[in-house]
Amino acid sequence: MYKIDPHTHSLVSGHAYNTIKEMAEAACKKGMEVLGITEHSPKMITLTTDEYFMNFRAIDRNAYGTHLLMGVEANIIDYDGNLDLPDYILENLDIVITSMHWQCYTAGSRKDNTKAAIKAIEKPYTVIMGHPDDGKFPLDYEEVVKAAKASNVLLEVNNGSLLPKSFRKDGKKHCIEMLNECERQHAHIVVSSDAHSDTAVGEVSYAERLLHDMQFPKELIVNEDRMKFDSFLKKL
Ligand SMILES: [Zn+2]
Ligand SMILES: [Zn+2]
């Protein structure tokens, strides 16, 4: 288990099962330093609205013992990498993850998907490209990793993609392909639980095993180094 888990969901995401407080308390109990609360954005069936993401001043980030990052997992909605929240909201969040979800994005060719991913990565507020491992949306990893490195964006190793019951397509195979490219280009990655319940907070054992088996360089994993992780945040 790492000290930082940047990507989790609370009740508000519509298909997750605990409150922010319960998620934060679970992280604190596990001795974690940083927890990202990154709800799905409005194009998914969620309870979130633009206003929801505009009022995070209401949340005391340090009330529960683990520092909270209040952000979003925004939907990439087209091949130009557009997202389903306006820039003026996204640039004020603690953390922005951009992801492709079948509910909000229609898979194109490898070239189309790669363009969409790169355009989303290049947005000035993007911190993490979420689960770039789903075979439903094939990517050119050489190009995506190059863009992420150039824009100081982290590529995610998503524990949820590696679960045997994952609904993503060939997540492990694509994750390995991406990690090999990250090692070759010396690009940083972040491991996340993508927890949708409090018991899954910080739970990344499949990702840890894969990184261990691949002997992936520890210095490229930001989860144990708060300063290194913080250097990827766009809003400090
Ligand atoms: Zn996602
Ligand atoms: Zn998620």
Image (cartoon, rainbow, N blue to C red):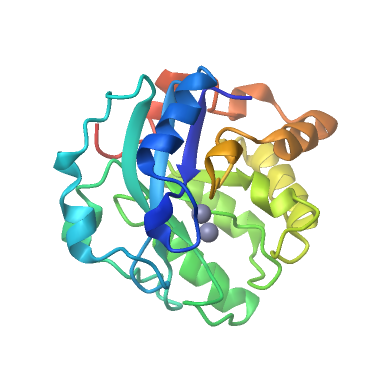
Q: Quadrant of residue 102?
A: bottom right
Seen in the picture, residue 51 relative to 64 is either above or below; the reply is below
Of all residues shown, which one is farthest toward the right?
A: 213
Q: Where in the figure is residue 165, as x and y percent of width and height?
A: 77, 58
Q: Nearer the viewer, residue 42 or 63?
A: 63
One can see residue 190 in this view: no
Quarter of the rendering occupied by the N terminus:
top right
Q: Where in the figure is residue 205, as x and y percent of width and height?
A: 72, 34
Q: Nearer the viewer, residue 114 or 90?
A: 90
Quarter of the rendering occupied by the C terminus:
top left
Q: Residue at x 49, y 29 (%)?
A: 26
Q: How many marks?
A: 0
One can see residue 210 in this view: yes
Q: Where in the figure is residue 231, as x and y percent of width and height?
A: 37, 28
Q: Residue at x 74, y 66 (%)?
A: 169
Q: Residue at x 55, y 47 (%)?
A: 194
Q: Quadrant of residue 28?
A: top left
User: In the drawing, does residue 198 fall left or right of residue 119?
Assistant: right
Q: Nearer the viewer, residue 184 or 52?
A: 52
Seen in the picture, residue 172 relative to 170 is either above or below; the reply is above
Q: Residue at x 73, y 57 (%)?
A: 171
